[in-house]
Amino acid sequence: MNSIYLGTWNALTLSKSRKLQELAEQIVDTQLEIAAIRETRWSGNGLIKRNNYSLHYRGSNKTGQAGTGFIYRQDEWNYILGFEPHSE
């Protein structure tokens, strides 16, 4: 049986410069393949794709409050069937 490593991460904020890159480096450097992220503090929703990871997110209507998402290694992309945000 194959294993998948899931985790959670309280980011506190990703609104500061380089915070997303730092988070991605920490996730990629661990055995985590997918991590749920809390407190992104971004507004709106979307997908950010980079060379070695992707991040789906949903935020509050107000920048600087709440926000959730999940980040995963790029090699997990084929296992993600979809993303439908309902609230932050």
Image (cartoon, rainbow, N blue to C red):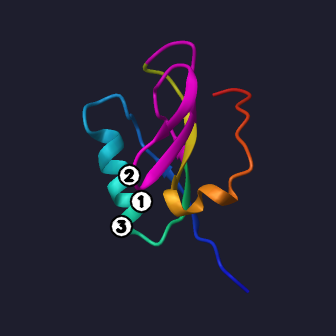
Q: Which residue is mark 3?
A: 29
Q: Which residues are magenta?
A: 37-63
Residue type at tag 1: Ile
Whole-percent x and y of residue 29?
36, 67
Query: Which sits in the foreground, 55 or 49?
Result: 49
> Do the residues bearing badges 1 and 3 touch, measured as CB atoms within 8 Å?
yes
Q: What numbered label is drawn on residue 11?
A: none
Residue 86 occupies quadrant: top right
> Do the residues bearing badges 2 and 1 touch, measured as CB atoms within 8 Å?
yes
SS type, badge 2: helix
Rounded to the nearest angstrom, the CA distance separating label 1 from label 3 is 5 Å
Whole-percent x and y of residue 41?
46, 27
Residue type at tag 3: Asp
Task: Kindly identify the residue that appears in the image at 65 percent across and 58 percent down.
Answer: 78
- Tell me which numbered mark, 3 or 2, is placed earlier along the sequence: 2
Q: Please tell me whether residue 66 is drawn above or below residue 31 in the rendered image.
A: above
Q: What numbered label is drawn on residue 24?
A: 2
Q: Please tell me whether residue 1 is drawn above or below residue 48 in the rendered image.
A: below
Extreme residue in the bottom direction: 1
Q: How many marks?
A: 3
Residue 34 occupies quadrant: bottom right
Extreme residue in the left direction: 17
Residue type at tag 2: Ala
Task: Kindly identify the residue that appears in the image at 51 percent across and 43 percent down.
Answer: 55
Asked if residue 33 can be seen in this view, the reply is: yes
